[in-house]
Amino acid sequence: MTITTAIVGYGNLGRSAETLIKAQPDLELFGIFSRRSELDTDTPVYPVDSINDYADQIDVLYLCLGSATDIPEQAPDFAKHFTTVDTYDNHKQLPHHYATMNAVAGEAGNVAIIATGWDPGLFSLNRVLGAAVFPEPQQNTFWGRGLSQGHSNAIRGVEGVKYGVQYTIPREDAIAAAKAGNGADIDGKDAHLRQCWIVADEADHDRITDTIVNMPDYFVGYQTEVHFISEEEFLRDHQGLPHGGRVITSGTLGKTKSTVEFALDLESNPDFTAAVLVAYGRAAARLKAEGKTGAFTVLEVPPYLLSTKSLEDLIAQDL
Ligand SMILES: NC(=O)C1=CN([C@@H]2O[C@H](COP(=O)(O)OP(=O)(O)OC[C@H]3O[C@@H](n4cnc5c(N)ncnc54)[C@H](OP(=O)(O)O)[C@@H]3O)[C@@H](O)[C@H]2O)C=CC1
Ligand SMILES: N[C@@H](C[C@H]1CC(C(=O)O)=NO1)C(=O)O
């Protein structure tokens, strides 16, 4: 079955999703819906305001929007007319997003798979699996060193920021302690430095710094550095999008100790995130075809639905 998909939002994630959809044998890309009319792509581009005119031609809509404001403000409206997949990653607000999307998609008879990607996403799966097997699990999550798209998107939304990125830098001693099973006293916020590099007018520097360091859900509680640089420096030194991280779970099983680690090393954060997003689009179309409706997190989507292989083949080849 060919699944007809579309993208809304042509930023880092949208560009990566475009490439990765085209690499899938069973997915077709109908087009890209954008606020902008001119995009550097050969894929058909449509005004996002016209998107509902195409609802009967699109099986899955990938919401490649920012989590800081775009998804909360826009995703529910898309879910009224489309089966959607998003990468929403404001962990504090996830229960609210889940409830909102479940109500809207359920009422409309659509599916909405939320919070795909790697954190939330594959890390969520590994946190649940890791903690489920140990009677008394010790679990720690670390990110970086790398560029957080969510935090970068959030700082770009601060008035006066022309360009901005945020790198997350974990404390190596904290990682070593977690690997040794001594992670009980590690505080995730204390274990990471958040380092921002921004282009903005000097008159706005103090206000921008204050807004960022006090930004709820994203920066409050973290050691945060805000550096201002020239546009030339930014375009020269801050174009890469690498990232990575690890979920480390350890504990005692009877009289023996075990440690489980799930690690990612990503040359491109958006490419990997888009790869996960795209695979969940296959699952969303299948859930919809089964008559399911409402919101689903990665914890509720059977893994085989992501695969191009049948369940029978997966059992025979990959179990
Ligand atoms: N779960 C996970 O593991 C991960 C989640 N993410 C999430 O993905 C999100 C997107 O990341 P990224 O692609 O780098 O973000 P970008 O800022 O590069 O792109 C966001 C896009 O949203 C569109 N958009 C729609 N409405 C607005 C608006 N009002 N203001 C600004 N843009 C708008 C724009 O596209 P256009 O101009 O074409 O309309 C824009 O390019 C991040 O915010 C992050 O939360 C990212 C990585 C991992
Ligand atoms: N959602 C994150 C993916 C990971 C990276 C991250 C961080 O650096 O704080 N937290 O979760 C992103 O937008 O890149």
Image (cartoon, helix red, strand yellow):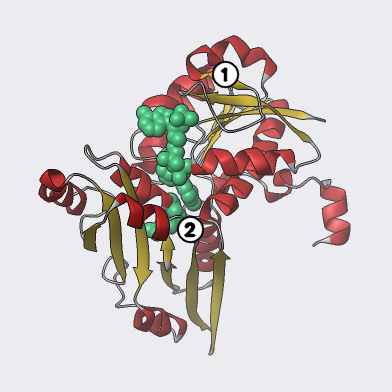
The residue under the point 62% across, 44% down is 301
Quadrant of the drawing holding the N terminus = top right
Name of the residue lying farthest toward the top? 53
Where 135 falls versus 54 (above or below)? Answer: below
Q: Is residue 71 visible?
A: no
Residue topped by disc 1: 46
Where 265 falls versus 112 (above or below)? Answer: below
Tag 2 secondary structure? loop
Label 1 residue near ligand 1, CB within 8 Å: no
The residue under the point 46% across, 82% down is 179
Left or right: where 52 falls relative to 315: left
Instruction: Mark 1: give few (<14), some (14-19) or many (20+) Cα within 10 Å.
Output: some
Specify the quadrant of the image occupied by residue 282. Answer: top right
Q: Nearer the viewer, mark 2 or mark 1?
A: 2
The picture places residue 195, in percent across and down from the top left corner, at: 29, 62
Where 220 falls versus 187 (above or below)? Answer: above
Where 19 falls versus 262 (above or below)? Answer: above
The picture places residue 84, in percent across and down from the top left corner, at: 56, 30
The residue under the point 51% across, 21% down is 37
Name of the residue lying farthest toward the front? 232
Foreground residue among 245 and 304? 245
Tag 1 secondary structure? strand
Residue topped by disc 2: 240
Specify the quadrant of the image occupied by residue 55. Answer: top right
